[in-house]
Amino acid sequence: MRLLLDTHVFLWVVTGNTRLKPAARELISDAEAVYVSAASIWEIAINARLGKIEANPEALVTAIDSSGLLELPVTAEHAAAVGRLPLHHSDPFDRLLLAQAFSVPLKFLTADSALATYGPGVEVLD
Protein backbone atom coordinates (compact mmCIF):
# COMPACT_ATOMS: atom_id res chain seq x y z
CA MET A 1 0.00 0.00 0.00
CA ARG A 2 1.13 3.54 -0.80
CA LEU A 3 -0.03 6.30 1.53
CA LEU A 4 -0.47 10.06 1.57
CA LEU A 5 -0.48 11.45 5.11
CA ASP A 6 -2.94 14.11 6.17
CA THR A 7 -1.16 17.13 7.63
CA HIS A 8 -1.91 16.28 11.26
CA VAL A 9 -0.81 12.67 10.76
CA PHE A 10 2.48 13.89 9.27
CA LEU A 11 3.02 16.13 12.31
CA TRP A 12 2.26 13.23 14.65
CA VAL A 13 4.73 11.00 12.80
CA VAL A 14 7.65 13.43 12.92
CA THR A 15 7.01 14.60 16.50
CA GLY A 16 6.37 11.14 17.95
CA ASN A 17 2.94 12.28 19.16
CA THR A 18 1.08 9.62 21.13
CA ARG A 19 -2.14 10.42 19.26
CA LEU A 20 -0.68 8.23 16.53
CA LYS A 21 -1.57 4.81 17.89
CA PRO A 22 0.66 1.74 17.47
CA ALA A 23 -1.66 0.26 14.81
CA ALA A 24 -1.32 3.44 12.73
CA ARG A 25 2.46 3.46 13.17
CA GLU A 26 2.54 -0.13 11.97
CA LEU A 27 0.37 0.71 8.94
CA ILE A 28 2.79 3.50 8.04
CA SER A 29 5.94 1.44 8.61
CA ASP A 30 4.53 -1.46 6.54
CA ALA A 31 3.55 0.77 3.61
CA GLU A 32 5.42 0.45 0.33
CA ALA A 33 5.79 4.25 0.21
CA VAL A 34 4.57 7.11 2.41
CA TYR A 35 4.14 10.60 0.97
CA VAL A 36 3.79 14.07 2.45
CA SER A 37 2.31 16.73 0.22
CA ALA A 38 3.92 20.10 -0.33
CA ALA A 39 0.40 21.36 0.47
CA SER A 40 0.85 20.11 4.05
CA ILE A 41 3.98 22.20 4.48
CA TRP A 42 2.07 25.17 3.03
CA GLU A 43 -0.79 24.58 5.50
CA ILE A 44 1.63 24.29 8.42
CA ALA A 45 3.48 27.46 7.37
CA ILE A 46 0.23 29.45 7.25
CA ASN A 47 -1.04 28.11 10.57
CA ALA A 48 2.32 28.68 12.27
CA ARG A 49 2.45 32.25 10.99
CA LEU A 50 -1.10 32.85 12.27
CA GLY A 51 -0.12 31.46 15.68
CA LYS A 52 -2.57 28.53 15.42
CA ILE A 53 0.18 25.95 15.83
CA GLU A 54 3.77 25.90 16.99
CA ALA A 55 5.87 24.51 14.17
CA ASN A 56 8.95 25.27 12.12
CA PRO A 57 8.06 24.65 8.46
CA GLU A 58 11.72 24.60 7.35
CA ALA A 59 12.56 21.94 9.93
CA LEU A 60 9.54 19.93 8.79
CA VAL A 61 10.76 20.01 5.20
CA THR A 62 13.99 18.41 6.43
CA ALA A 63 11.98 15.96 8.55
CA ILE A 64 10.25 14.56 5.46
CA ASP A 65 13.46 13.03 4.15
CA SER A 66 15.02 12.22 7.51
CA SER A 67 11.86 10.31 8.49
CA GLY A 68 12.00 8.17 5.36
CA LEU A 69 8.97 9.89 3.87
CA LEU A 70 8.62 11.08 0.28
CA GLU A 71 7.61 14.56 -0.84
CA LEU A 72 4.63 14.84 -3.18
CA PRO A 73 4.67 18.09 -5.18
CA VAL A 74 1.42 19.84 -6.06
CA THR A 75 0.81 19.75 -9.80
CA ALA A 76 -1.69 21.51 -12.05
CA GLU A 77 -3.41 18.14 -12.48
CA HIS A 78 -3.89 17.89 -8.71
CA ALA A 79 -5.28 21.41 -8.56
CA ALA A 80 -7.77 20.69 -11.36
CA ALA A 81 -8.84 17.43 -9.67
CA VAL A 82 -10.10 19.44 -6.67
CA GLY A 83 -12.98 20.60 -8.88
CA ARG A 84 -14.09 17.02 -9.50
CA LEU A 85 -14.43 16.16 -5.80
CA PRO A 86 -17.89 16.04 -4.24
CA LEU A 87 -18.53 18.97 -1.90
CA HIS A 88 -18.56 16.87 1.27
CA HIS A 89 -15.91 19.00 2.93
CA SER A 90 -14.93 22.65 2.50
CA ASP A 91 -11.36 22.82 3.87
CA PRO A 92 -9.20 23.73 0.85
CA PHE A 93 -6.11 21.91 2.13
CA ASP A 94 -8.02 18.68 2.79
CA ARG A 95 -9.62 18.92 -0.64
CA LEU A 96 -6.24 19.36 -2.34
CA LEU A 97 -4.74 16.46 -0.38
CA LEU A 98 -7.69 14.24 -1.33
CA ALA A 99 -7.38 15.26 -4.98
CA GLN A 100 -3.69 14.37 -4.91
CA ALA A 101 -4.34 11.01 -3.28
CA PHE A 102 -7.05 10.09 -5.77
CA SER A 103 -5.04 11.31 -8.78
CA VAL A 104 -1.82 9.41 -8.08
CA PRO A 105 -3.48 7.08 -6.61
CA LEU A 106 -2.55 6.79 -2.94
CA LYS A 107 -4.53 5.81 0.15
CA PHE A 108 -5.20 8.98 2.17
CA LEU A 109 -4.45 8.47 5.87
CA THR A 110 -6.29 10.82 8.25
CA ALA A 111 -7.82 11.01 11.70
CA ASP A 112 -10.63 13.24 10.40
CA SER A 113 -13.69 10.99 10.27
CA ALA A 114 -15.58 13.60 8.19
CA LEU A 115 -13.32 12.68 5.26
CA ALA A 116 -14.55 9.07 5.23
CA THR A 117 -17.45 10.28 3.06
CA TYR A 118 -14.97 10.36 0.15
CA GLY A 119 -14.95 6.56 0.07
CA PRO A 120 -12.53 3.67 0.22
CA GLY A 121 -9.54 5.77 -0.83
CA VAL A 122 -9.60 7.32 2.65
CA GLU A 123 -8.30 5.43 5.68
CA VAL A 124 -9.51 6.97 8.96
CA LEU A 125 -7.36 6.22 11.99
CA ASP A 126 -8.92 5.30 15.32
Image: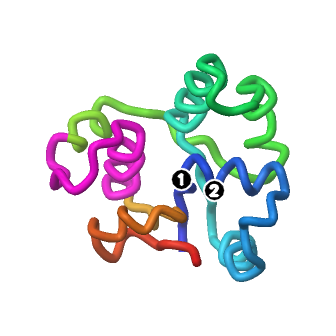
Give me the disc on residue 105. none
Label 1 Cα crowd, 10 Å radius (few <14 / some 14-19 / many 20+): many
Q: Residue at x 35, y 70 (%)?
A: 116
- The magenta region covers 83-104
Residue at the far bottom in the pictured view: 23
Identified by mark 1, the residue type is Asp
Say what secondary structure mark 2 lies in. helix
Is residue 92 in the magenta section?
A: yes
Q: Is residue 36 above or below residue 16?
A: above
Q: Residue at x 15, y 48 (%)?
A: 84
Say what secondary structure mark 1 lies in. loop
Q: Is residue 8 above or below residue 125?
A: above
The one of 114 and 99 positioned closer to us in this rendering: 114
The one of 40 and 100 positioned closer to us in this rendering: 40
Image quadrant holding the C terminus, namely: bottom right
> Is 15 displayed left or right of 118 in the figure?
right
Q: Which residue is mark 2?
A: 9
Residue at the far top in the pictured view: 49
- Across and down, in percent, residue 61 comes to 72, 32
- Across and down, in percent, residue 123 comes to 47, 73
Give the quadrant of residue 49.
top right
**Tally of marks:** 2
Q: Do callouts 2 and 1 mark residues in contact (Cβ within 8 Å)?
A: yes
- Across and down, in percent, residue 29 comes to 74, 72
Q: Which residue is mark 1?
A: 6
Q: Residue at x 30, y 29 (%)?
A: 76
- Across and down, in percent, residue 10 comes to 66, 51
Q: Is residue 116 above or below residue 102?
A: below
Identified by mark 2, the residue type is Val
Give the quadrant of residue 117.
bottom left
